[in-house]
Amino acid sequence: MIYTYMISSPIAKSNQNPLVIEGRAFLEFPRWLVIWREAKSTLNQFLFNAIPIFLVITVIASVLNWLGAIAALANIINPLMGWFNLPPEASLPIILASIRKDGLLLFAEPETLAMLTPLQVLTGVYLAGVLLPCLVTLLTITREQSLRFALLLLIRQAIAAIFFSLLLAWGGLLIS
């Protein structure tokens, strides 16, 4: 909420900004035609927008892994893990989660859990999950807005994620 408040424009924070839905909203029995139209729209978006981008990202990630680029990148950022009170081994899940969010699952592996404290797991999962947006989302924003808008959003999100991860890592040590 703090991050959203910080990045929101003054117009969005204004008390004069009316709600999208004013007054009371009443529940009504759903109509099957409306449900089908919404479901069809969602399925079309998924099948024709998300799946092709997901497949391209998966192929690129597989090629990068096959070439050893992901391991090399993990080795490059290993020293940075100390900033977040994380062992160097946490760099791989963070790299993979930056490409595809299911890379976060590496933090749930028994070997990883055995070497990390609960605070380190929280810090690592937060950093990996929030540092970069999902690439599908980023590509969609680029297509719908502009590359400049998407890159500014990416930079702002990365800075906020790094700051809050540092706060989690070191502030959590002070509290515990």
Image: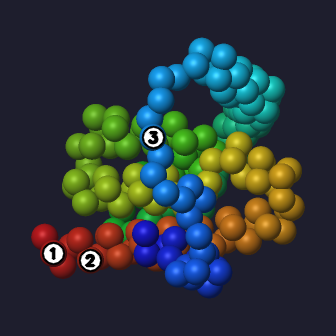
Q: Amino acid at mark 3?
A: Phe
Which residue is more in the foreground, 21 or 6?
Answer: 21
The image quadrant of residue 150 is bottom right
Quadrant, the N terminus: bottom left
Which residue is more in the foreground, 36 or 4?
Answer: 36
Q: Is residue 123 above or below residue 134?
A: below
Rate crowding at label 2 as few (under 14), some (14 to 19) or many (20 or more) other CA atoms within 10 Å: few
Q: What residue lies at 34% left-to-right and 38% top-to-bottom?
A: 108
Residue indicated by mark 2? 171
Residue indicated by mark 3? 26
Q: What residue lies at 60% left-to-right and 15% top-to-bottom?
A: 32
In terms of secondary structure, where does tag 3 sit?
loop
108 with respect to 29 (left or right) = left
Q: CA distance from mark 3 to mark 2?
A: 45 Å
Q: Is residue 23 above or below residue 58?
A: below
Q: Is residue 36 visible?
A: no
The location of residue 171, given as percent across then percent down, is 26, 77
The location of residue 165, given as percent across then percent down, is 41, 69
Which residue is more in the foreground, 5 or 152?
Answer: 5
Query: Mark 2 touching mark 1, by CB under 8 A?
Result: yes
